[in-house]
Structure formats: C-alpha cells, structure tokens
Amino acid sequence: MAFHHPKLIPILLALFLRCYAAMNRTRRKPFPSTPRSVVSDGGLDSPPGDSHRRKRCAWVTLNTDPSYVAFHDEEWGVPVHDDKKLFELLVLAGALSELTWPAILSKRHIFREVFADFDPLAVSKLNEKKLIAPGSTASSLLSELKLRAIVENAHQISKVINEFGSFDKYIWGFVNHKPIVSRFRYPRQVPVKTPKADVISKDLVRRGFRSVGPTVIYSFMQVAGITNDHLTSCFRFQDCITAAEGKEENGIKDMPEEKKNNDNMIESELSISIDELSFS
C-alpha cells in the first residue's frame, strides 16, 4: 500500500469523522451504571456524594437514620443466596418484633459476634443457658424467647440443608427461584404479609422453626430479595431486578446494545477502508 496514494487522505479523514460522531453519540446517551463503593455486606453499591439526588422509597426521608438509608440503598431487596446470610436476615427480621431496623443495624456487629457469624451449625451448638443468662451479651439484644428460637432455628436450618442441599434451594423453591416483583407505586400498597408468606411460614413451623409468623417471613422475603418491594419510582427497584436477572456482577453492567452496535459499525468501516486502500 502506498502512503502517498491519492485516495488515502480523504478515506482516512472520512473514517475519522464517522468514528468521532459515533463516539459522541455514545457519550450523549450513557447507560446507567451502578457506582462503586465499599460495602461490608455485599449487595449493590451506591456512590459517595450522590445520595441526595436519588429518588428512594417514600418511607426513606431526610430524617431517616443514615444506617437504614445505607441498608435500603445497598441490601434491602437484593436477592441473597448464601445460607449464612439468609439465616442472618431471618434472625434480623424476627428481631423486628422487639427492635426497629436502625436499632438492629446499630447492633449488627454484636449479633454476628454472639451468633458465630450466623453459621447454622455453630449456632446450633451454643449453650442456651449461657446465652440467655442475665447480664450476657445476647440477653442485651433480645428476649429469652427470641434467643431460644434462634438456636432452635439453627438446628432446623441444618436439617433443611441436609435434605435440600442448602437453605437457599429450599427457601427460593417457594417462588420458583425467581423474585416476586411487586411493582408498588405507593407505600400504602406494600403489605405486612402475603399468602405466599403464610405458606412459607406454615411449612417452617411444620418443620420445627419458631418465631416465624407470616409477618416475620414477609419482612425476611423483602430484605432477602425474595420479593422486590421497592416502589417503582425508587432507583433501587430496577437495580434489584437487574441483580436478580444476573446482568450485573460486582457492580459492572453489560455493555449497552447501542454501544456494541456502534463499535461493530466502526470496526466494519475500518476493515472496508483498509481493504479499499490495499487493493487500490
């Protein structure tokens, strides 16, 4: 190929202009990405400095405890499939009958320390007398009834794991391994329990679980992402759908189709132009 070929300059100039225009089109329509930040408990991340510009569920207000805002933005509604994490969320949902979410979240590190990071096998071996003894760390968290229920539920989860292979397979089997997407527009539409929660509750009780009424189970379903109850106007609604569909890994989303098409077009034009130069 001769570098002084008379067709070289106009072809390269035209190619450059088309590539530049394609790049600008892509920049004008950036695809939504999930910003990254360090989140101790996994889930989807939210960016520093951007929290006040995002539309959240109506029950999250400017006066909401910051720990709960972070919980809403990073964990609540994200599908969970790890057995230890599911056990933890079941315990925390049960604690709602005695504590608020902000209070629970402020003591979360103590819960994890007392209950061996929610390893069902380890919790099932805890000494109940020491656990519920007056002045114990556990007794400062929950009532004796709740503490005994946690130990018993650890026993039952271990049995479920032996039967199904994992607690994850068992609990997600009730929804055919796909989250329920509620698509609520208003807070008044969000229930405290549902027929599905009632079915799960009854089966857990039948298996020997304690303190797992339908209200507790529905709270558990919400936080574990078994149901997506973010309001449709909340920025987390679509994020949780995307996470459930497996289109997002570690906060990085697939390249949008438009950008893929633009890149393919540029590559095609470049190839054609080189061929024209080569055979001229």
Image (cartoon, helix red, strand yellow):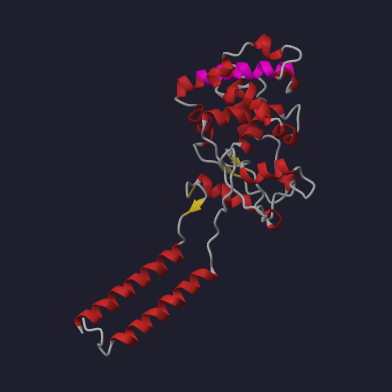
Q: Identify the residue at image location x=68%, y=34%.
A: 193
Quadrant hosting residue 88:
top right
Asked if the stretch drawn in magenta spans residue 82, the answer is no
Up/down of 135 relative to 86, above or below:
above
Q: Quadrant of the C terminus?
A: bottom left
Instruction: Residue 174: give x, y in percent of width and height.
Output: 53, 32
Q: Identify the residue at image location x=67%, y=49%.
A: 231
- Judging depth in this view, the residue of 63 and 3 nearest the camera is 3
Q: Which residues are magenta?
A: 143-159
- Judging depth in this view, the residue of 213 and 276 nearest the camera is 276
- Judging depth in this view, the residue of 150 and 208 nearest the camera is 150
Q: Identify the residue at image location x=37%, y=83%.
A: 14
Up/down of 13 relative to 52, above or below:
below
Up/down of 247 relative to 117, above or below:
below
- Which residue is the extreme one toward the right? 63
Instruction: Residue 62: give x, y in percent of width and height.
Output: 78, 50
Q: Is residue 165 left or right of residue 104?
A: left
- Which residue is the extreme one toward the front? 3
Q: Quadrant of the N terminus?
A: bottom left
Instruction: Residue 166: give x, y in percent of width and height.
Output: 48, 26
Asked if the stretch drawn in magenta spans residue 144, the answer is yes
User: Can residue 11 be seen in the rendering of this structure?
Assistant: yes
- What's the magenta bit mostly, secondary-structure-wise? helix
